[in-house]
Structures are given as C-alpha cells and as structure tokens.
C-alpha cells in the first residue's frame, strides 16, 4: 500500500478521459489519494493525445513545467501515458531526463506496478509494446467516474481503417473488441450502482465484434443492453459512416434506451478529398445514410468532425464542404485544421495548405456552423424534452442535464429534483452552446 497522492492531467478524447478514470481507480486501490495540482502530488501522470500537433505540443509544455517540481521533490514519480507515450517510446525517456516512465496505450493496466518499481527501485521504465489481447480493455469502468449517473464503457479499442491523416491505428493498434458478455456484465453492475446513462466507447463502434469472429455485432450489443434494469440511456461514439447501417438506424428508432444522437464524422464535403483521406465513402453516400437515419429516427441529432486544409484541398473542395454543411445541417460539429502527423500517409503529401489559409477556412466553417446550431437551439424554444439531471452548479444556482439528443440544458435549481432524475423540461431560451429551460 502507498499512502501518497496522485495527479492526472488528461489531454484528448473521451477514450483518454476514460483511461484516466481507470488509472485513477488503480492508484486509489493502492491507497493513494487524488489531488488537483502537480505541486501536491507524489505521482504525476500526463495522459496524452497526439491526434494533432497542437495537442502534442501541450504535452511537452506540461512536461517542461514539471522539471522544477522534480528538482524540489526528487521522489516524485512522473509518467507519460497514452498516444504520445505510445509513439515516443524509449525516445521520450532519453529526451526528457526528469521523466520516470512511459506507459503505452495497451499497458495502462500496469501503472500500479510501474509506480512501485520507480518508487522502490528507482528504475526508469518504458512499457509500450502492443499486445494481441489488450489487458487494459478488460479493466472495468470505475464506479467513481465522470458523474455519479453517467459512465463511459469501453467496448473496443484501436482502429484498422488507416485514414491517411490519422495516427490512431499506430497509437492504439488494430481493432480489438471486448467480449459481449463482459460488456453486458459491466453495464449491469454500473446500473446497479446508480448509473443511468452509459456511453459506449470505441474508435469505430460500428465495427464492434468483427474481430471476434463469432457473429457478435454492434446492433446485437445494443439489443442485449436495452432493458438492463435501471439503465435509462445508451449513447455511443464514434461511428464511421462507411460502417453505419440501416440496422443501426432501426435500433435507434426501436430500442427505448438508445438515444437519438449519432456522431458521424464527415471530414470533408469534397469527394476528391475524401478519396485522398481514404474514408471509404463519397459525399452522396454519406448523405444517403443521413437521409435513412432521419427517415427512421425523425428529430435525431447528428454531429460530425470536419477537417479543413487537407493537402491539396482547393478553394472549390472547401466550398464543397461549406455546401455540405448547409445541406446536411449538423446539430454541432467539431472542426480542425489538418495537422501533419508522424507516420501517416498524408504527412508527406504535396500541396500542403498554408496555415493562414487553413485558419481562414476554419473561421468560415465556425461562422456557418454557429449560425446553424443557434437556429436549432432557437427552434427548440417552447418544446418539452426529457432531461437526465447530471449535476448541480451551486455557484449559478442551476442544475444541468442533457436531452436524449445530447443538448446541454440548464435549469434553475429546484428542491424537488435530484441528480439522476429523468425529468421534463420546457426550453425557454436557445443559446449558442446550450439551452435554458424550466421544469414542467
Ligand atoms: S476511422 Fe480513420 S480517423 Fe477514425 S480513428 Fe480510425 S483511422 Fe483514425
């Protein structure tokens, strides 16, 4: 048992957030207590993201700041986990002399042992080999997750798609699915402990089960999870358009707990760019899938990722993206400038778009999407939605929750509602990023 303290700093996606929750639970099992600043910690873990250059720079800057803390407290253990660890491997230990351990994406389950070896034997450790059955995939979601009523549940890890711009297949390895029964048992246990909503996580959840070779599929998993006692809502992310099926749209329509929201990254509206990205669909095919979904699940919310400035993206290609945004009218998007990532095919493509041009295109995308999102939010005024209360913001005297379509709603605090309640709220104001409502 250790009696020390730990601090985890997390960068990147929900997978990383959830990995951090699991690492926190493992360190607490050792007897360690969480603190909220590196200054107060005996063990510091930087859980990293390398999807874009900017995210990677933030990691190096965070590590730089730890140097003087380590000088003041030489017993402090500093570990890097996640995608930067996976890519940097032993090179990180050579480059950053105050770093003690590099913990790759398949090896986070070994964190307690790694901390013990550093503390007791003063070793510097690199653990970053991929394994054919990722142990970390089987670590259950901790009870003390991001909220007492909402939990992430990993259903698979890795990706076998190799889109030309993306590091994930290199940092997380090939797709590996968790056995269906293991996921069901975990969700039942979470629901039993008070969790009302689970978000099933994977880089490409639509491919869930393919690698198991026993007929398991994502829709079968949803069939099994719908009706778990106590569980009100099931969300999932991320979906890949090429694998999105009519069967999934049908489940979203027919299974009571499956929420009417899908995150379906489009990335570009230009077929030429989609081909160069290796996405496996055209804009027309993507729109057909959206139409199927909207026909089967009226009112479903659709969100997406967009990349601007992919190498060779002309003004005309970019206009195609803008037209697609106008035509599809996503509820929300996450948009990024193309970033040259090591090891990816797109890194060395000719005709890289200058950064000022990427910034200008990104600003246009933001402006257009902000208008569309605000229109959706204004249209919601006067309508009544079911909200799951996720928590209380005491400083503003409000409770907050989300609609089934994943829109954040704030409501003035009421004595009669508790975190975890499913309640009906009338929207009184549609704002840029959220909705405001009153209980009905
Ligand atoms: S589907 Fe493409 S973008 Fe998504 S994680 Fe896999 S390789 Fe990356």
Image (spheres, grey):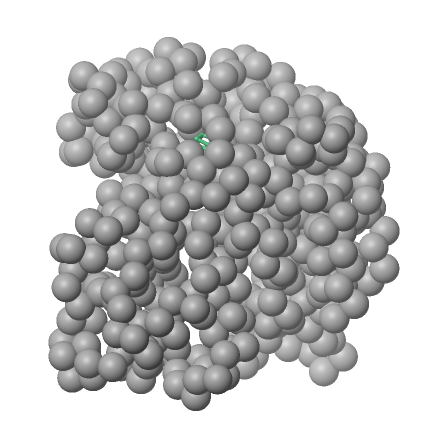
Up-down relation of residue 411 to residue 80 (above or below): below
Where residue 115 appears, x then y in whole percent?
Answer: 37, 71
Q: Which residue occupies the foreground of this view, 193 or 327?
A: 193
> Horizontally, is 311 left or right of 287 in the view?
left
**Hey, which quadrant is residue 292 in on the image?**
top right
Q: Residue at (25%, 81%) from the top-left corner?
A: 75
**Hey, which quadrant is residue 178 in on the image?**
top right
Up-down relation of residue 376 to residue 440 (above or below): above
Where residue 86 appears, x then y in whole percent?
Answer: 34, 47
Q: Which residue occupies the foreground of this view, 258 or 68?
A: 68
> Horizontally, is 81 left or right of 350 in the view?
right
Numbered-mark total: 0
Query: Ligand 1 shows up in which quadrant of the image?
Result: top left
Q: Which residue occupies the foreground of this view, 256 or 142?
A: 142
Most distant residue in the front direction = 121
Where residue 7 appears, x then y in whole percent?
Answer: 37, 74
Q: Which residue occupies the foreground of this view, 432 or 125?
A: 125
Where residue 59 appears, x then y in whole percent?
Answer: 25, 57
Q: Quadrant of the C terminus?
A: bottom right
Up-down relation of residue 242 to residue 407 (above or below): above
Q: Residue at (17%, 33%) from the top-left corner?
A: 355
Q: Residue at (45%, 38%) from the top-left corner?
A: 173
The answer to whether residue 68 shows anywhere in this view is yes
The answer to whether residue 323 shows anywhere in this view is no
Q: Residue at (65%, 29%) from the top-left corner?
A: 210
């Amino acid at each position: 048992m250790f009696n020390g303290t730990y601090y985890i700093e997390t960068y990147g996606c929900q997978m990383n957030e959830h990995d951090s929750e699991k690492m926190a639970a493992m360190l607490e099992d050792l007897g360690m207590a969480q603190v909220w600043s590196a200054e107060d910690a005996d063990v510091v873990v930087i859980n990293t993201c390398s999807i874009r250059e900017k995210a990677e720079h933030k990691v190096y800057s965070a590590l730089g700041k730890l140097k003087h803390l380590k000088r003041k407290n030489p017993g402090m253990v500093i570990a890097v986990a996640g995608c930067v660890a996976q890519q940097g491997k032993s090179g990180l230990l050579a480059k950053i002399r105050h770093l003690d351990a590099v913990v790759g994406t398949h090896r986070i389950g070994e964190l307690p042992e790694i901390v013990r070896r550093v503390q007791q034997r003063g070793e510097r450790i690199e653990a970053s080999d991929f394994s054919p059955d990722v142990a970390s995939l089987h670590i259950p979601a901790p009870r003390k997750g991001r909220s007492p009523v909402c939990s992430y549940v990993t259903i698979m890890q890795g990706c076998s798609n190799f889109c030309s711009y993306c590091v994930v297949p290199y940092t997380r390895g090939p797709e590996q699915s968790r056995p269906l029964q293991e996921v069901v048992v975990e969700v039942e246990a979470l629901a039993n402990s008070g969790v009302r909503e689970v978000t099933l996580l994977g880089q490409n959840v639509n491919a869930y089960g393919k690698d198991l070779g026993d007929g398991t599929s994502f829709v079968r998993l949803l069939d099994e999870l719908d009706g778990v006692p106590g569980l009100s809502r099931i969300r999932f992310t991320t979906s890949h358009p090429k694998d999105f099926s009519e069967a999934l749209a049908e489940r979203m329509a027919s299974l009571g707990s499956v929420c009417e929201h899908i995150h379906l990254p489009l990335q570009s509206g230009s077929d030429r760019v989609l081909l160069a990205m290796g996405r496996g669909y055209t804009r027309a095919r993507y729109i057909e899938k959206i139409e199927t979904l909207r026909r089967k699940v009226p009112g479903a919310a659709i969100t997406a990722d967009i990349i601007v400035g992919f190498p060779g993206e002309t003004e005309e290609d970019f206009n195609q993206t803008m037209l697609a945004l106008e035509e599809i009218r996503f509820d929300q998007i996450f948009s990024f400038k193309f970033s040259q990532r090591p090891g990816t095919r797109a890194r060395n493509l000719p005709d890289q778009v200058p950064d000022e041009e990427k910034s200008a295109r990104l600003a246009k995308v933001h402006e257009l999407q902000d208008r569309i999102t605000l229109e959706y939010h204004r249209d919601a005024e006067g309508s009544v939605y079911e909200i799951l209360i996720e928590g209380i913001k005491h400083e503003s005297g409000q409770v907050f929750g989300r609609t089934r379509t994943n829109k954040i709603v704030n409501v003035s605090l009421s004595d009669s509602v508790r975190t975890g309640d499913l309640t009906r709220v009338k929207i009184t104001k549609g704002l840029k990023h959220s909705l405001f409502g009153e209980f009905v």
